[in-house]
């Protein structure tokens, strides 16, 4: 890969990093690998038709478009999303979490492939809390889901690579809409189990599954009750070989514990299951559980009620995002913030007065 990179002009690399795929394509790739052309940006119609026809290149570009924070891209993105609205919402959205090493990638590879082979179309997205903070991209890595990535019925959206996107955070809900419009009927949203991200993912999926390892006793003690209460199923992975008896014992312990917790979904009992993602064992059972969940909650109305609440939550989280971006990117705030921060740290100004001053700066320049 490095060898290939050296052929590209620097500005192309930049654009690639930027992931604004709209930007440049290799012209006549086979004819001359060194020739690059600037491609015209697509029209709303091209995006809409491309997504509806499941043109994967255009789908990927549309996702990049909705992720862009540039004003002109946001406008087009909103028009595209509006036109696609009648075609969204028909998938089952499944969140998958688990600590690093729990086997999320292996599980998604096995589960996703199983679903594709059953005729479903599967999109895999990632909510990666670390990408902008630590620069590490750990999720949605295509190389760890090789079979699924090659499957014609699957679409994997890798998470942004190490820190290149800076403060851009993923617009997973919009991405989900695009994938649904492109005909993906199962959306898997992967996240690493480090706390905050579970709440984010729970707020956008129908079914939330947590992958865990054996040693339930220790884990149960350390695991936050709050996180357990978000889940619709706990799946003890790596139930194979010598580990199998331990996994079955852990399943029992989890079930006893779950019995005392408030269920994440009204009318649904969260239970523990075992599987071996590596051997593909238990995968079918987990799908049957999810099918039953969808059937039960659709019948009781809980499925639609949750979706409606999620739409409402989305409004508020979008307003918060918008205000935060607007505040911190305001030139006067940017100028003043380091000075005020210093004042507070050195004890010359109270936090309350500092915040008030910054907000005044923001509001006075606004009007
Ligand atoms: N024996 C066994 N090993 C497994 C199973 N599932 C995953 N593994 C192994 O566990 C290791 C971690 O698996 P991953 O799928 O990379 O786990 P992950 O949760 O995506 O890990 P992070 O990328 O660190 O978040 C790998 O070496 C897998 O081969 C399983 O069912 N049985």
Image: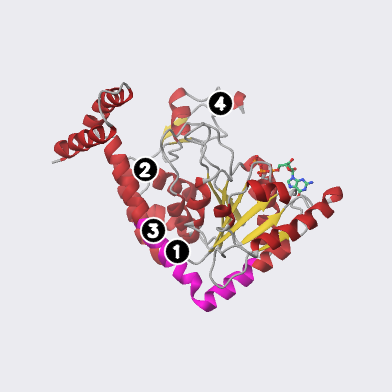
Q: Answer few, some or many: residues within 10 Å of disc 4's Cα (few below 14, many 20 plus, some between 14 and 19).
A: few
- Start-end of magenta stretch: 290-315
Residue linked to disc 4: 5
Q: Earlier in the sequence, mark 3 or mark 1?
A: 1
**Quarter of the picture holding the N terminus:** top right
- Nearer the viewer's eye, disc 3 or disc 4? 3
Ligand 1 image position (quadrant): top right
Q: Earlier in the sequence, mark 3 or mark 4?
A: 4
Q: Earlier in the sequence, mark 4 or mark 2?
A: 4
User: Secondary structure under badge 1?
Assistant: loop
User: Secondary structure under badge 2?
Assistant: loop
On residue 88, the disc is 1
Residue 264 found in image quarter = bottom right
On residue 41, the disc is 2
Ligand 1 under 8 Å from disc 2 Cβ: no
Q: Earlier in the sequence, mark 2 or mark 3?
A: 2
Is 301 inside the magenta-drawn segment? Answer: yes
Looking at the image, is 210 positioned above or below residue 36?
below
**Real-space CA distance between mark 2 and mark 3, rounded to the nearest whole angstrom:** 32 Å
For the stretch drawn in magenta, the main secondary structure is helix
Residue linked to disc 3: 313
User: Secondary structure under badge 3?
Assistant: helix
Residue 192 lies, in percent from the top left, at 58, 44
**Real-space CA distance between mark 2 and mark 1, rounded to the nearest whole angstrom:** 24 Å
On residue 317, the disc is none
**Furthest-bottom residue in this view:** 299
Looking at the image, is 62 positioned above or below residue 351?
below
Q: In the figure, is residue 319 to the left or right of 180?
A: left
């Amino acid at each position: 890969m490095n060898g290939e990179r050296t052929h590209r002009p620097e500005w192309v690399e930049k654009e690639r990093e930027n992931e604004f795929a709209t930007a440049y394509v290799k012209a006549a790739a086979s004819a001359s690998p060194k020739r690059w052309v600037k491609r015209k940006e697509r029209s709303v119609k091209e995006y809409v038709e491309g997504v509806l026809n499941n043109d994967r290149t255009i789908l990927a570009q549309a996702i990049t478009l909705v992720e862009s924070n540039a004003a002109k891209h946001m406008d087009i993105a909103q028009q595209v999303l509006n036109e696609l609205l009648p075609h969204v919402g028909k998938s089952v959205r499944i969140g998958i979490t688990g600590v690093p090493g729990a086997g999320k990638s292996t599980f998604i590879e096995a589960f996703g492939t199983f679903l594709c082979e059953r005729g479903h179309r599967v999109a895999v997205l990632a909510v990666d809390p670390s990408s902008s903070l630590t620069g590490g991209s750990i999720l949605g890595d295509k190389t760890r889901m090789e079979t699924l990535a090659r499957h014609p019925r699957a679409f994997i959206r890798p998470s942004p690579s190490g820190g290149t996107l800076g403060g851009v955070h993923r617009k997973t809900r919009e991405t989900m809409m695009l994938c649904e419009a492109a005909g993906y009927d199962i959306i898997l949203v992967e996240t690493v189990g480090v706390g905050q991200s579970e709440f984010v993912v729970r707020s956008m999926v129908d079914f939330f599954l947590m992958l865990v390892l054996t040693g339930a006793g220790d884990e149960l003690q350390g695991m936050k009750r709050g996180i357990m209460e978000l889940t619709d199923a706990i799946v003890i992975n790596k139930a194979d070989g010598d580990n199998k008896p331990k996994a079955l014992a852990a399943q029992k312990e989890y079930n006893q514990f779950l019995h005392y917790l408030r269920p994440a979904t009204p009318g649904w009992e969260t239970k523990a299951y075992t599987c071996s993602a590596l051997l593909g064992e238990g995968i079918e059972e987990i799908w049957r559980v999810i099918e039953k969940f969808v059937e039960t909650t659709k019948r009781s109305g809980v499925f639609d009620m949750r979706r409606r609440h999620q739409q409402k939550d989305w409004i508020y989280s979008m307003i918060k995002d918008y205000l935060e971006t607007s505040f911190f990117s305001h030139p006067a705030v940017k100028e003043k913030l380091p000075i005020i921060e210093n004042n507070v740290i050195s004890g010359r100004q109270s936090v309350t007065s500092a915040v008030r001053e910054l907000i005044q700066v923001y509001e006075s320049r606004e009007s």
